[in-house]
Image: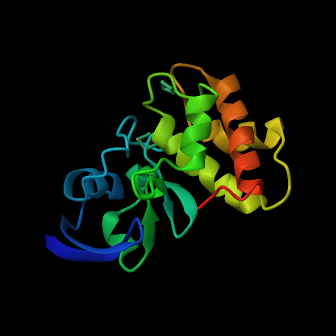
Amino acid sequence: MKMPLTFMLNNQQTTLEIDARQTLLEVLRNQGGMTSVHRSCEEGECGACTVLLNDEPVNACLVLAASVQGASVLTSEGLVKNGKPHPLMKAFTDELGIQCGFCTPGMLMNAYALINRAGDNLLTDQVIRKTLEGNLCRCTGYVNIIKSVHTAQKAKLAGEWW
Ligand code: FES
Ligand code: FES
């Protein structure tokens, strides 16, 4: 059954024609053109499809698209501002937190929510590891990913953030 879905996608009101059985992952990639939302396990195990739904990280492969009617969805495309990479993206590049990049968009969205939640409290390695444990990196670059999150938080605390 076809239906219209209206929601905020990367801060823009968006209406897409969807099939009522589609997952958010399918709709974001196929109708929404958000190809940073990666498809891998499709059973909530790898985190490659992580997006923010009303500011909270979710696995888009486990969310029925129809359920996000009226909600706000942020993908890593939405972090880019006027063509400029977000400081979180810059931190991942500078600290070599990216290898093949397959896990990176999902990792970024989870890290973005974590840093925003932390406020002025400095994140520990342990908290970062625990938060990102659902985002699997097949290149196993976890040490540099943790460094990237620390660097990104410093950028936020220095006021370089949006
Ligand atoms: S594709 Fe969604 S968690 Fe793996
Ligand atoms: S950078 Fe390759 S899967 Fe993580």
- Please name the residue shown 41% across and 53% down the image: 60
Q: Residue furthest bottom?
A: 70
- Please name the residue shown 70% across and 24% down the image: 143
In this view, the residue in front, 13 or 158, is: 158
Q: Quadrant of residue 17?
A: bottom left
Image quarter hosting the N terminus: bottom left
- Point out residue 34 in the picture as x, y percentages from the top left corner: 31, 51
Q: Residue furthest top?
A: 139
In this view, the residue in front, 27 or 41, is: 27
Relative side of 64 to 130, left or right: left
- Point out residue 150 in the picture as x, y percentages from the top left corner: 75, 40
- Please name the residue shown 56% across and 40% down the image: 90
In this view, the residue in front, 107 or 5, is: 107
| Count of numbered circles in the view | 0
- Please name the residue shown 48% across and 55% down the image: 79
Colour scheme used in the picture? rainbow
Camera sees residue 46: no
Relative side of 66 to 48, left or right: left
Q: Does 59 appear above or below 68? A: above
Relative side of 67 to 29, left or right: right
- Point out residue 15 in the picture as x, y percentages from the top left corner: 24, 74
Relative side of 109 to 2, left or right: right
Q: Quadrant of residue 5?
A: bottom left
Camera sees residue 50: yes
Image quarter hosting the C terminus: bottom right
- Point out residue 11 in the picture as x, y percentages from the top left corner: 42, 71
Q: Residue furthest left?
A: 2
